[in-house]
């Protein structure tokens, strides 16, 4: 964004293009000054109803029926750590319909990564997050509801401390509401559509095909009014299922329908993005089912291009530790993966030392299963050899900050974060850029570095070496070793069969350690986070009449305290810094005075209007 990808600076030259002929003749049918548009203006308040479509995930596979009743019946509060990336919500925790996510991660919210729809409600552990316009495109968490297209504008009006409710509607009503909204914007006249309240939520599953019919069970899930999620087979990591999603993607590219927009594969799924104003769900489902009749016969002979890309890794990098420190201060203090993600990975996989963790990471060849995991061409990858698959859980709740190109493991998967942002994978280190915003180079024929089914191999560099590499690589001054190759599915399955006994022993040992860690979490009260409940009301306090009370302008948390009790301060001096909506907000002294009381410590939650500092006369 911006000018040449940055903010405008003094001396920049901005050229204005001449108007095109059709732009010179733009007009509206009526004089706006004479129109009564009050009926078109929406009601905006501190309490909002968001209309959603149930799915793609729900009861009984992931949530209990009571969980879904709670989700729709309760009011949710907007968390102060919210932004265009995602709107975090404070409210009740789910009971969950399963005890964990298996190979996808320890927490029951963890799933094998799939693509996300715009406006989907993403449970990152026990905390729901509405994914916004800058949100991730792919990830490994369950999503029980998706905001309809006609209500997406409301997300931009939500502020920390506001309250929302979710109201389920049918796909048919969602499509009609978008059409009505489009007509209203085009004509600037009121259009009406009556929404029929849903007496029952129904199911997020639109249709299925059995294994007997097409070789693998296929489940078609609703993901809002513009997305449909196609899932294959059981909820396990099986590269054959990824090949099946790849085959469907290729078939749809060769046999497109009007209205198809984008195809995004996950680990065992393919998300279909389409224009529901042009292509209805029934027609799309029929087309997808036709595809499945041809796919199962092709898999056994399918081979895909697979480059081996060697990239540097700064093990346990300083930027990773900084992100952990920030998480402990402002998100969760008692997380079992803190203060060392590497120690957590060692423990949960039953390894003897962190050196064993390091050896596996550097020995593994990671197969790229998806791109855009979180952001900007970021790969989600798993080791080709199952004996290299370290399993972890994801942060609960997710981090609010992760350094660009940090490398982490979540479930059985490794991810390289494409850009600075939130995240949940357990850190192992940091590497070079996955996305080049500057120029084309030998490695960057496209803006993204990696391709589907590439294999990543790491080699170690120091933190300082990586800083130099990160400066040179986007400019084409740090060449990578890239080896061309193929990945035949039949050869991979032969590898699995030939090493079945040792693979089984590795998994059994890993599962025992996983179960021990999970049992300890329950025993020590660490399974659930304590960060989700609404802030308790503090008792009323009285202050001396001559005191000046400095209160919070926003809902958020105390990030830094800059002064101590007893200190003399000047008007305009920063007293403390709040964190809210992913911003650092200084709170300054309104007058000269002495700090007689600091009412809150770093990490404390605050609501708008809450007293922070008491100043007395000098």
Image (cartoon, rainbow, N blue to C red):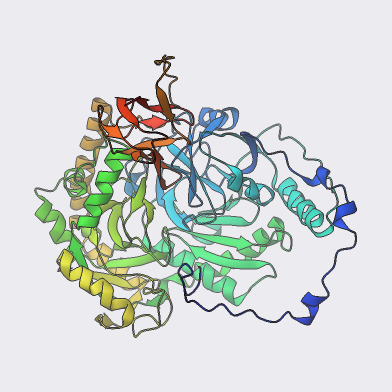
Extreme-bottom residue of the structure: 442
Q: Position of residue 507 (x, y in %)?
A: 23, 50
547 versus 238 height, above or below: above
Does residue 334 appear in this view?
Answer: yes
Q: Position of residue 28 (x, y in %)?
A: 86, 64
Q: Quadrant of the C terminus?
A: top left
100 versus 477 height, above or below: above
Does residue 459 appear in this view?
Answer: no
| Residue under the image location 74 percent in, 46 percent down | 173
In depth, the one of 461 and 228 nearer the eye is: 461
| Residue under the image location 49 percent in, 60 percent down | 215
Q: Position of residue 26 (x, y in %)?
A: 82, 71
In depth, the one of 201 and 531 nearer the eye is: 531
In depth, the one of 202 and 78 nearer the eye is: 78
Is 386 on the left-hand or right-hand side of 160?
A: left
Q: Position of residue 375 (x, y in %)?
A: 43, 61
Is 174 on the left-hand or right-hand side of 379?
A: right
């Amino acid at each position: 964004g911006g000018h040449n990808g940055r903010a405008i600076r003094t001396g920049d030259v901005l050229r204005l293009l001449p108007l095109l002929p059709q732009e010179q003749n733009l007009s509206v049918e009526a004089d706006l000054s004479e129109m009564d548009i009050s009926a078109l203006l929406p009601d905006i308040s501190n309490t909002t109803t968001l209309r959603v479509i149930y799915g793609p995930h729900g009861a009984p596979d992931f949530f209990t029926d009571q969980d879904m009743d709670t989700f729709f019946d309760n009011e949710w509060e907007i968390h102060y750590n919210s932004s265009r990336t995602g709107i975090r919500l404070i409210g009740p925790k789910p009971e969950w319909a399963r005890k964990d996510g298996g190979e996808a991660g320890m927490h029951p919210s963890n799933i094998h990564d799939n693509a996300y729809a715009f406006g989907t409600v993403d449970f990152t552990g026990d905390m729901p997050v509405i994914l916004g316009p800058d949100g991730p495109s792919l990830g490994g968490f369950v999503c029980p509801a998706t905001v309809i297209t006609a209500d997406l504008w409301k997300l931009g009006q939500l502020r920390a401390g506001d309250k929302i409710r979710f109201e389920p509607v049918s796909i048919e009503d969602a499509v009609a509401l978008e059409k009505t909204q489009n007509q209203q914007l085009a004509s600037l006249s009121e259009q009406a559509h009556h929404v029929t309240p849903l007496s029952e939520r129904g199911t997020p599953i639109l249709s299925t095909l059995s294994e007997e019919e097409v070789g693998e069970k296929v489940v078609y899930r609703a993901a809002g009014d513009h997305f449909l999620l196609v899932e294959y087979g059981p909820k396990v990591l099986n590269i054959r299922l990824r090949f099946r999603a790849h085959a469907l993607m290729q078939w749809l590219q060769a046999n497109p329908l009007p209205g198809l927009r984008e195809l995004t594969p996950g680990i065992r799924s393919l998300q279909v993005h389409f224009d529901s104003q042009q292509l209805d769900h029934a027609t799309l489902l029929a087309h997808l089912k036709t595809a499945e009749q041809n796919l199962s016969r092709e898999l056994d002979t399918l081979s895909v291009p697979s480059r081996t890309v060697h990239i540097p890794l700064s093990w346990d990098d300083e930027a990773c530790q900084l992100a952990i420190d920030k998480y402990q201060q402002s998100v969760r203090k008692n997380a079992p993966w803190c203060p060392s993600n590497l120690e957590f990975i060692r423990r949960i996989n039953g390894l003897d030392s962190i050196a064993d963790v390091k050896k596996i990471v550097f020995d593994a060849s990671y197969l790229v299963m998806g791109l855009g995991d979180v952001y900007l061409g970021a790969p989600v990858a798993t080791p080709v050899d199952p004996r290299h698959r370290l399993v972890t859980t994801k942060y609960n709740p997710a981090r609010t900050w992760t350094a660009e190109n940090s490398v982490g493991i979540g479930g059985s998967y490794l991810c390289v974060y494409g850009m600075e942002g939130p995240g949940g994978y357990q850190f192992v280190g940091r590497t070079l850029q996955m996305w080049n915003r500057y120029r084309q180079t030998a490695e960057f024929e496209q803006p993204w570095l990696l391709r589907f089914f590439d294999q990543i191999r790491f080699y170690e560099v120091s933190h300082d070496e990586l800083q130099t590499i990160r400066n040179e690589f986007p400019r084409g001054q740090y060449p990578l070793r890239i080896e061309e190759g193929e990945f035949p599915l039949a050869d991979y399955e032969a590898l699995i069969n030939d090493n079945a006994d040792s693979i089984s022993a590795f998994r059994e040992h890993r599962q025992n350690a996983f179960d021990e860690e999970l049992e300890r979490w329950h025993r020590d009260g660490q399974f659930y986070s304590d960060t989700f409940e609404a802030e308790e009301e503090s008792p009323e306090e009285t202050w001396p009449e001559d005191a000046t009370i400095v209160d919070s302008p926003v809902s958020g948390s105390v990030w830094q305290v800059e002064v101590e009790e007893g200190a003399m301060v000047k008007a305009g001096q920063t007293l403390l810094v709040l964190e809210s909506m992913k911003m650092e907000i200084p709170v300054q002294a309104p007058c000269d005075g002495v700090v007689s009381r600091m009412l809150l410590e770093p990490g404390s939650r605050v609501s708008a209007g809450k007293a922070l500092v008491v100043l007395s006369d000098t």
